[in-house]
Amino acid sequence: GRGASILCCWECVCDPIIMATRNLGTMSDSVLQDYHTRRHTSGLNTEELEAPLALVHSTSRINWLTARYDPDDSQRLQLLATGEGGFEELLGSLDDNLVIYGCFMFAAANQVKCAFVSWVGEGVSGLERARVSMHRSDMQAFVQPVASFDIQEREVPAALSAAVKASIATQVGASLLSYDGLAHISLDTNNIEAEREESAEEVYGRSELEPLPSAPPTTDADTGLLEALWAGEGLPAARAAALAKEVPQSLLGEVLWVWGGHEQLTPEAAAGLLSAASEEAAEAAEAAPHPGEALRGEGLRLSLCLLLRVQMLREGATEWGVEFARKRGGLELLSIAAQQLVSRHPQWMLTRHQALSCLEAASCALLGLSAEAPPPPKPSSTSAPLANAGGKQKLQIAQQPPPPP
């Protein structure tokens, strides 16, 4: 039949591949085991890691390992380090002169799962980097993780942990959700209770409608002031009014207070504010303008999103937006901060909406486009609707000029 002819044609084309596959049936069990496990399709030898990996996957307290290439054999991996302190302890074994593969166990929704990480240090040669592209997938198959990450830069461990949690929640999905609909992920299986208590305090102990402690309280005079200030800074009046309506009454004082430093908000300073808010780094807060110190470690706040969004939406701000998004890494910093927001405060929906709008404005700026959507085209008066002519339906279509490039 048709299926048999297709199979026959396929065999004719791919005969060498099929014959090679059939030859596997002549291998002994020991050879097959070596072919499929210890030496992978790229020739990578992971035999030394079998016992340590089994220990990580077991119920022992060892919950991470890292491996490096054998200095005397570029096809063999050897154990570098193991530990009981989870993902953040694993980060301490990274070396700028090595290619490192690793894995760690994490817990969520009463499940313990494995995640894979890879690292290529700044001092690694081009030849070694090329080798990673061949070996990484085989190492992943050996570890059998449910999530995987490439760590590309050294960051503050707390910020990197937040980004990894957000990525795990995205990669693994609904299977990690607890009874409350949230993904409570612990990156240290030996410290689950402490992390769970800290996470609960962080998620449920604060509301997004609660202003920063250092921000002045909202007063009656603040209600119409924000709209007037934004309109005076080059924002179209209609957009200024619409944005002002998006600010909850309890946060008006904070938004006005944060906006007070906009005159010193260069693109570089805006990137510094995001770094201070996301990384909890004292040096980033010191380099950032007002209110850098107050925002340090607070993550994305609705007030910070609005500050950046208004800067990119106001008239004549195209240059500012391009500098911020492209040259100062503003779009990447916003993406990291948005991931942290989802991980730390999944119920902060108002702030998430502002973060997404801010990301949209920065994405447009990266392309050198205006974040303002153009008005829809007006229908042409020369085009005729469907008409009844001589008892038959006839569609008249007028020729339109070609769209602008």
Image (cartoon, rainbow, N blue to C red):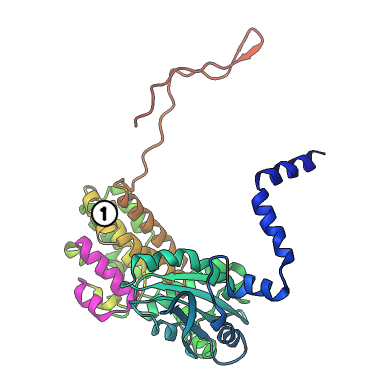
- Compared with residue 245, is residue 302 higher up or lower down, i.e. above or below? below
Q: Position of residue 102 (x, y in %)?
A: 48, 78
Q: Position of residue 182 (x, y in %)?
A: 56, 74
Name the dominant secondary structure of the magenta segment.
helix
Q: Residue furthest right?
A: 1
Say which residue label 1 marks. Answer: 321
**Can residue 168 be seen in the rendering of this structure?**
yes
Quarter-of-image position of residue 156 = bottom left
Quarter-of-image position of residue 173 = bottom right
> In what quadrant of the picture does the N terminus appear?
top right
Please state if 289 lies on the left or on the right of 123 as rendered.
Answer: left
Q: Secondary structure at mark 1?
A: helix
Range shown magenta: 266-290
- Compared with residue 256, is residue 373 higher up or lower down, i.e. above or below? above
> In what quadrant of the picture does the C terminus appear?
top left
- Compared with residue 401, is residue 10 higher up or lower down, i.e. above or below? below
Q: Position of residue 11 (x, y in %)?
A: 71, 46
Q: Position of residue 166 (x, y in %)?
A: 48, 71
